[in-house]
Amino acid sequence: MVNINGTLIQSEQANLSLENRGYKYGDALFETLKVVNGKILFWEDHYFRLMSSMRILRMTIPMTFTMEFLESEILKTVEENNLLAKSSRVRLNVDRGEGGKYKPNKDSNVGFNIIAEPHDNPFYGMLPFEDYTVDLYKDFMMAPGLLSGLKSNSKSISVLGSIYAEENGWDNCLVLNTNKSVIEALNGNLFLVKDDIIKTPPLEDGCLNGVMRKQILDALKNNPNYKVEEASISPFELQKADELFISNVIIVIQSIGKYRKKSYGNETAKDVLQLVNGKMRLS
């Protein structure tokens, strides 16, 4: 079952209009959520990121789009799919409705849809990494700016980069911005570890304003064992690093095992994962 603007219907009956602006122009935003035993993890951060993104795209936010309303619609969808007592991956999609060309019609109505599917792992654990291999994706680059940091439906670089990675037998690729700095992976934010320094690209470089990125930075804020830097990362730094890891809300951390001829460890990543798990238990 899927949720279309509050109505639950069978997925095979969920027809999208050819005039839908999310389909025609990518005029849409989405949040990928992890729901465990009826709790949406980091829901407040997801909600405020969505509202901020809608304002940046100048979408009219319906009065009904309160945090409580959207939370109830998400959990309603999860329950209808018999996932309330399990772990699930949920996509909340918001679009500007129908009408207009590039310029939306004034009477276009913002709508939402929600899809829930089972997710095997309810817990955040360290994933196998020794053979997890990445390389740079250099065919297209991200232009830094507010739009590049949004979780919008315009994901051509992630799509093309994923195809490129598969063609070359890699698990993922790292994305560059137009200044030739490494900003993120295809499916999450990037962290680089060198000695006791944990470094991640700043939002100004064009990386996604990731919810799990925020949790990791918060967990490390007052930790005396590490120095955290939000600073640009050059491709040259990758091969000098002790560790590289990717973060998103579904997996939390995926350590990178290999980049070109370099192999990495994951001791710091394991420590960071424990800190995030501890932060979750306290919330």
Image: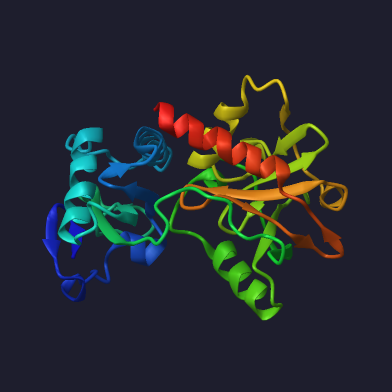
Tell me: 23 left or right of 177: left
Residue at the spot 68% in from the left edge and 56% down from the top edge:
175
Instruction: State the residue lying farthest toward the bottom.
Output: 167
Residue 247's x, y, as percent? 58, 48
Q: Is residue 182 visible?
A: no
Q: Is residue 169 above or below residue 252?
A: below
Q: Is residue 127 above or below residue 211?
A: below
The N terminus lies in quadrant: bottom left
Q: Is residue 140 visible?
A: yes
Tell me: 83 left or right of 29: left
Q: Quadrant of residue 51?
A: top left
Residue nearest the observer in this picture, 50 or 102: 50
Q: Is residue 19 above or below residue 41?
A: below
Residue 133's x, y, as percent? 72, 65
For the image, the number of numbered tags is: 0
Residue nearest the observer in this picture, 107 or 67: 67
Residue at the spot 47% in from the left edge and 47% down from the top edge:
249
Q: What is the image's colouring?
A: rainbow
Residue 75's x, y, as percent? 21, 48
Residue at the spot 53% in from the left edge and 35% down from the top edge:
276
Residue nearest the observer in this picture, 229 or 106: 229
Tell me: 236 left or right of 101: right
Q: Quadrant of residue 10?
A: bottom left
Residue at the spot 83% in from the left edge and 65% down from the top edge:
260
The C terminus lies in quadrant: top left
Residue 202's x, y, as percent? 66, 36
